[in-house]
């Protein structure tokens, strides 16, 4: 498996030419016959496991109000056509997905232009599960970030900071996930504006993520966390899964970002090496 090698390359700060060469080696390995790749996954350099932080992409997945559910329609079948193919219809910001800076700020970088070395990052997990179980409107605060640093040290350079609220367990039910009140207002945790500004102003992060539908609280009337993060040229990832399985520090996240031209975001396959 090439991912740990790529990560080591990034961490050692090799030149762009060297980094691309390493990626090329991974691509070549990917062309090997399937039989040659069988066997247990080997994770050198201290990694023990790979955790999938991605929800299955399906029509039952909760979507942000105003978006259409995912549609998956078989177009060709092996029985009839000799090969299988599905037609997918979805909004860019559906499922476990990336928000590019251009999602909220005109003229900033689109998802296809995010530097690849920012998509492999030290993973910081801020857990709010106990608070979120009692208060759906709780927010990641600057104090939460400082408490994490007291236990684990300063947020690493280039880190991806993820909020774990336990909301991913609700994804089996759209009603529970959206958690609307009698007025139709959603209630779910997110990042406070102050925490977002702290991370982009006083720490060197690549991006932030949540296990809810939005970087902002569900009940937010304005997108203050989005604007603080994306406006600073960072990215966000929403609807993450399984953050409770990874440690609060020490893991590395790999974000398979979308690369269609001009993408304001799009579904992403997100993995954690632990």
Image (cartoon, rainbow, N blue to C red):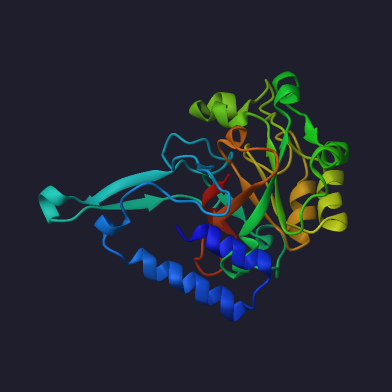
Q: How many marks?
A: 0
Does 217 sit above or below residue 226? Answer: above
Nearer to the camera, 36 or 17? 36
Percent coordinates x, y for residue 26 in the rendering: 44, 67
Percent coordinates x, y for residue 166 in the rendering: 63, 29
> Dividing the picture into quarters, in which one does residue 131 lie?
top right
Quarter of the picture holding the C terminus:
top right
Q: Residue at x 51, y 72 (%)?
A: 22
Nearer to the camera, 75 or 136? 136
Q: Residue at x 32, y 53 (%)?
A: 87
Does 111 sit above or below residue 186? Answer: below
Quarter of the picture holding the N terminus:
bottom left
Percent coordinates x, y for residue 196 in the rendering: 81, 48
| Horizontal arrangement in the rendering, residue 230 relative to residue 42 (left or right) | right
Percent coordinates x, y for residue 102 in the rendering: 66, 63
Does 270 sit above or below residue 69? Answer: below
Does any portion of residue 145 appear in the rendered image?
Answer: yes
Q: Residue at x 35, y 45 (%)?
A: 72
Quick one: which residue is furthest to the bottom in this view?
17
> Dividing the picture into quarters, in which one does residue 53 lie?
top right
Does any portion of residue 114 appear in the rendered image?
Answer: no
| Horizontal arrangement in the rendering, residue 210 relative to residue 20 (left or right) | right
């Amino acid at each position: 498996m090439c991912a740990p090698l790529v990560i080591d390359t990034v961490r050692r700060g090799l030149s762009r030419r060297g980094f691309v060469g390493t990626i090329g080696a991974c691509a070549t390995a990917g062309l090997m016959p399937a039989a040659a790749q069988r066997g247990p996954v080997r994770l050198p350099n201290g990694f023990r496991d790979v955790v999938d932080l991605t929800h299955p992409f399906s029509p039952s997945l909760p979507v942000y109000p105003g978006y259409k559910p995912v549609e998956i329609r078989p177009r060709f079948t092996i029985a009839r056509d000799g090969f299988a193919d599905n037609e997918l219809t979805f909004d860019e910001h559906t499922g476990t997905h990336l928000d590019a800076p251009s999602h909220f700020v005109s003229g900033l970088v689109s998802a296809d232009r995010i530097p690849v070395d920012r998509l492999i990052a030290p993973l910081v997990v801020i857990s709010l599960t106990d608070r979120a179980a009692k208060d759906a409107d709780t927010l990641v605060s600057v104090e939460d970030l400082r408490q994490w640093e007291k236990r684990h040290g300063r947020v690493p350079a280039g880190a991806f900071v993820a909020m774990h609220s336990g909301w991913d367990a609700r994804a089996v039910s759209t009603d529970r996930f959206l958690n609307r009140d009698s007025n139709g207002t959603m209630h779910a945790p997110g990042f406070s504006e102050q925490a977002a500004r702290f991370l982009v102003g006083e720490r060197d992060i690549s991006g932030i993520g949540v296990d809810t539908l939005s970087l902002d609280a569900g009940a937010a009337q304005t997108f203050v966390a989005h604007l603080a993060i994306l406006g600073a040229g960072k990215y966000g990832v929403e609807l993450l899964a399984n953050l409770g399985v990874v440690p609060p520090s020490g893991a590395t996240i790999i974000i398979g970002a979308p690369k269609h031209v001009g993408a304001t975001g799009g579904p992403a396959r997100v993995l954690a090496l632990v």
